[in-house]
Amino acid sequence: MEARRSTLLIGCAALAREITALAKLNQWDHLATEWLPASLHNRPEKIPAAVAECLIRAGDDYDEILVAYADCGTGGQLDNVLETHKVRRLPGAHCYAFFAGPEVFDALQEEELGSFYLTDFLVRNFDRLVIRGLGLDRHPELHSSYFGNYRRVVYLAQTPSEVLLTQARDCAERLGLEFEHRFTGLNPLGAALGIDASGPVTEEDATWSA
């Protein structure tokens, strides 16, 4: 029997819980992971160098390396790094596209360009990454600079959790924006990774914690 290829997935920690759940559901036991801090999204110019360091460190230890980022605001610089190392990433400009699915995300953007997106991870870490991460706890006057052009919060939910839904509504209220809830599950992310995500997914399936 042919041995399974070893694969390293380098990704944003904002995806770790969901990708761990998908790997568990689909017995993707040949997968090793390395997670980079989600706070890099507040400084996207640092993402390419951080990914490059992981790729250099990995060397030739794996048969395949995948990068679980979209462009994520790097202006094509991440793609330049990946081209050098002959590594592919997830498709799209934003991770929200593979949480929602590209067609759904495009429709949401066309419907309201001024949409601020939340995922399960961002709801759980809203204070750390949004309020404190953007300095709004220290400088609330910056709120209009960051969110003045937004009209609504769209919560792309990966798990059916009433607790997270309540927290997401509170996030929208704190930002002074309208609220919309879209349940996505993990199928769109699984499709982007090329993994079957058809099994049932609950909070308990995601063993990684932020």
Image: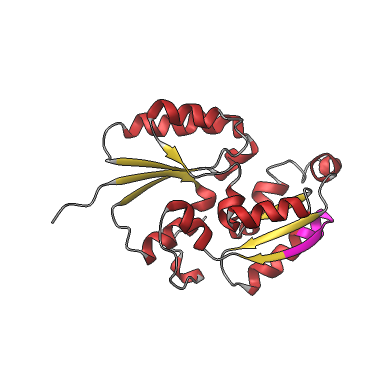
In this rendered view, identify the residue nearer to me: 171 or 196: 196
In this rendered view, identify the residue nearer to me: 44 or 113: 113
Q: Residue 175: give x, y in percent of width and height.
A: 80, 54
Tell me the quarter of the image containing the N terminus. bottom left
Say if residue 177 shows up in the picture.
yes
Residue plotted at (60% across, 41% down): 93
Residue plotted at (30% across, 31% down): 59
In this rendered view, identify the residue nearer to me: 132 or 46: 46
- The vertical placement of 138 against 79, above or below, is below
Question: Picture quarter containing residue 108?
Answer: bottom right
* Magenta highlight range: 172-180
Horizontal arrangement in the rendering, residue 8 relative to residue 111 (left or right)? left
Say if residue 17 shows up in the picture.
no
In the image, residue 176 lies in the stretch drawn in magenta:
yes
Q: Residue 53: give x, y in percent of width and height.
A: 42, 30
In the image, residue 50 lies in the stretch drawn in magenta:
no
Horizontal arrangement in the rendering, residue 48 relative to residue 196 (left or right)? right
Question: Picture quarter containing residue 20?
Answer: bottom left
Q: Residue 11: give x, y in percent of width and height.
A: 47, 44
Q: Residue 150: give x, y in percent of width and height.
A: 81, 48
Q: Residue furthest left?
A: 1
In this rendered view, identify the residue nearer to me: 33 or 94: 94
Residue plotted at (72% across, 51% down): 109
Question: Picture quarter containing residue 174?
Answer: bottom right
